[in-house]
Amino acid sequence: MTSAFKLSRRVLLQGSAALGATTLLAGLPFGSAQAKDIAVGFIYVGPRDDFGYNQAHAQGAAALKKLGGFKVLEEENVPETVAVEKTMESMINLDGAALVFPTSFGYYNPHMVKLAKKYDKVRFLHCGGLWSDKDPANAGSYFGYIDEAQYLSGIVAGYTSKTGKLGFIAAKPIPQVLRNINAFTLGARLANPNVTTQVIFTGDWSMPVKEAEATNGLINQGVDVVTCHVDSPKVIAETAEKRGIMVCGYHVDQSKLAPKGYLTGAEWNWEALYPKLAKSAQGGEKIPNLVRGGLKEGVVKTSAYGPLVEEKARKHADDIKAKLTAGSYVIFKGPIKDNKGGTVIAAGTDRGQTDIELEKMNYLVEGVLGAIA
Amino acid sequence: MSGDLLGWWGVPLAVLAGAIRVSTPFLFVSLGECITEKSGRINLGLEGTLVMGAMSGYAVSYLSGSPWLGVLAAGCAGAVFGILHALICSLPRVNDIAVGIALMLFGIGLAFFLGKPFIQPQAPNLPSIPFGWWSENAQVRDALRVNALFIIGVILAPFLLWAFRNTRWGLILRTVGDSADAALALGYAINRVRMFATASGGFLAGVGGSFLSLSYPGSWSEGLSSGQGITAVALVIFARWNPMLCFWASLLFGGAAALGPALQSVGITQGYYLFNAAPYMLTLLIMILTCSRDRTLAGAPGELGVTR
Amino acid sequence: MVVIGGEGALVLGGLAASAIAMTMPSAAPLVVQIAMAVAAMIAGAAWIALAGGLRHWRGVNETISSLLLVYIAIAVFNHLVEGLLRDPASLNKPSTPNIGDANMLGTIPGTDIHWGLAYGIIACVLAYILIYRTTFGFGMRVAGGNVKAARMVGLPVGRLVLVACGLAGASAGLAGMVEVAAVHGKANASLIVGYGYTGILVAFLARHNPLAIIPVAIQLGGIGASGGLLQRRLGLPDATVLVLQGLIFIAILTSEVLYGRLPWLKRRPA
């Protein structure tokens, strides 16, 4: 009889953290940081070499490390529970972290907000773009308009697909994901107006077997270019390559995994942003509470084109990329219809990147096959 | 829709293909657990063994360049875990279920610990045999591209059934599992038999894990197993400790798991969470329909902790 | 009986707690908290009692059915959190609406520990009294030791099994409520992190004695918390903690052998 689920581990974590830390670590070497180096903590929700979301952040941390003058602390596989509060507290109290990057979306509320209130001398910068003026002033949130890069991937995919069928494997139908699906499809239809994108939602951020199964299912329906929005696109890229179709990457460069079929990809450019944010903290500048940017600000980038991308596609994509980088191009430009026939953005309405409406996206545009559950 | 696409007909085909692809780890782990449980012990640690097998198989395949060596290494790693379980459980008053859960944690931990350097590199995968060469249709060809390990599993299931029933080894195993007293009276070394059974169970579970990393999906990552090992242990009870039924149960489970993505790829996107849970619902439903309160489970080894 | 479905009861308990909080926006915090606890316990109890009932009426093995029910519970949970019960404002992390700051369980004054710990300790003590100090508990222990003997002396085994399952589920459900009311303030995917499985080990380590669960669970949490330092100070991978936990469990379970052999370790009648 196991009548004993009553005390869950994390519930007790709070009370016991100190106990565990002191008992277990009494014998460990406690090296102290160089006084001049400021300690910066990075917290990842998954393994830092996942060829995806967490690797992108870890590359940013690595860029900071290379810069010198910072002591970089990293912790991976930290769940979005009290565990992340404990990690942050421990980084602050034991390692003297002056700046913390909790990089997963779910770390923000209540965990990071709570700690930002408690440690008002420490800077907290969260990836997700959630900060509002009700939140503590020593906290901030940043995010990238990666749909710009997805749009470019879409253009390349639209030109390169022979069947006119693209596949998109997504974790959950949340606005960020829908925005990527829609941007990818709009880009593809710019190249070829008859293209469709079939969407499969796997239900969670990291489900390798289901993702492989979804990729196979799409290929069997005639899809010849896939892309995705899951935490680790590794399995999808490998499966696509194995089955001889093309793939557009996400989060980081996956061309190594699919040397033949890799077209291009939408990548984060945390390598550029993190050193910038850390230096601003080092210099004692005011914390940037809300940082957002796309290609123009260098927060996102695209992978180099693969061997299968023709000149025509490169030219068109490069052209649009130049316009996006200059800030003179609008992706969500009316009229845009959803895939049920209704108009979601009226003719004459331009929804530029900073438009808050885009962050509430709850539709799939015309050309996307699939529905939000 | 172009000529060589099956559209809606793709769904049953995808379920079949998925059944073959997804079921293999379930098949190996459940066959392994079947041997272990026949000897009267339950090893819940096979989830850890599976993950350990996946990691060591991938690592050895990468380092040696031979995926089959990887499979062997995975099996051996699994066998070591099996022996560990058997050794600890042979001590008096040690609970096999608790040790299993502890070993599950240990196995997963050790695999993650040692597996860090192998997440990035790509290891050679196991070959598949194209049984669909006769078809013009790409989809049919893909569905019938059957992995060599699956075929080994297909042969292994009836062989085990035969061996349980018709060999001396099978008889000893069943005697030990059904009544330790009887086995003792007949002069069998109970602990040695159980050690052998748990070790071979671990070996098969390790091989099942290597399928995940070396065939489908075919790479090592920490999220690779989503509870396949522990589900397979449950499938053994579902299959009434019959290796052939383990085979059918694994196929059914794998097919049901492929249903969700297959339906979405033809455009049915409502309630995908519920479709994704289809294998579990189906298994539960069948259990409810086929069990009866008045009958104990036919074929249950008498010494098994969970059925008493 | 071995039920490994605590995880399912936990997530559904958390869901029920936040769902009930949704329906009473203007009630007093204490009322809301009690309603949440009750709803969570009912949901958890019903879920595990389902496994017990299937065992009793249909002879379905409770170990498997409870395990399968975990996956089904998680699917139902996700389905509802992203559908019917979703807070439209929870854009990128689908969640139920916030239960409101006033309804949160606070921390014990002067410490960093939230009241969830008190809930847990009370539950442990109640379980101890129930199992070792009541006739009902005695009946449960007899039925757990030997079903045939229990039937022979006329114990209502079926009812005992159902009630025991219900209580087990209720406490797992309560854990879900605590996680919602003390930590997250809403139900979302962060609830699904495997506490249910750790709970089973805790139970075994505590040798099924509810009072022993308290120190065991605290120590376990401590090891988990120290994992970060192992990563940062020694450059060890995060999995070190898992390996360490596994080794400790194995060592403790193996030490079971010593009970009764060493004079200072007395074996407690099970």
Image (tube, rainbow, N blue to C red):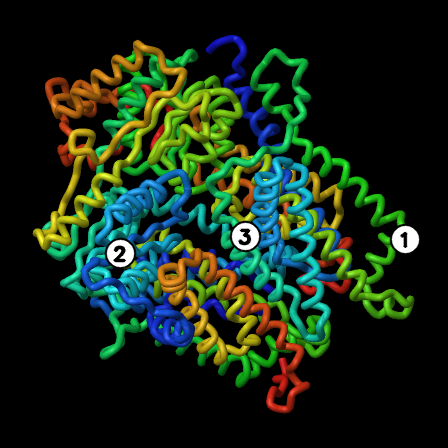
Give the label, 2 or 1, closer to the camera. Answer: 2
Name the residue beneath numbered marker 3.
B111
3D distance between C-alphas at marks 3 and 2: 29 Å
**Residue C96 location, x and y as percent?**
29, 50
**Residue C206 location, x and y as percent?**
53, 75
Could you tell me which secondary element the residue under label 2 belongs to?
strand
Name the residue beneath numbered marker 2.
A71
- Give the amino acid at mark 3: Ala
Determine the image quadrant of residue A299. Answer: top left
Sort mark 1 into few (<14), some (14-19) or many (20+) by Cα contacts within 10 Å: few
Could you tell me which secondary element the residue under label 1 belongs to?
helix
Q: Earlier in the sequence, mark 3 or mark 1?
A: 3
**Residue B148 location, x and y as percent?**
68, 32
Residue at coordinates 42% horizontally, 11% vertically from top-left?
A: A162
Identify the chain of the residue marked 3, using the numbered disc in the image.
Answer: B
Residue at coordinates 48% horizontally, 30% vertically from top-left?
A: A238
- Give the amino acid at mark 1: Arg
Query: Residue C263 or A60: which is nearer the viewer?
Result: A60
For residue C134, above or below residue A340: below
Q: Are marks 3 and 1 on the same chain?
A: yes
The answer to whether B101 appears left or right of B295 in the picture is: left
Residue at coordinates 41% horizontally, 44% vertically from top-left?
A: A49
- Give the amino acid at mark 2: Lys
The answer to whether B265 appears left or right of B168 in the picture is: left
3D distance between C-alphas at marks 3 and 1: 36 Å
Give the label, 3 or 2, closer to the camera. Answer: 2
Disc ID at residue B168:
1
Query: Residue B59 or C268: which is nearer the viewer?
Result: B59
Sort mark 2 into few (<14), some (14-19) or many (20+) by Cα contacts within 10 Å: some
The C terminus of chain A lies in which quarter of the figure? top left
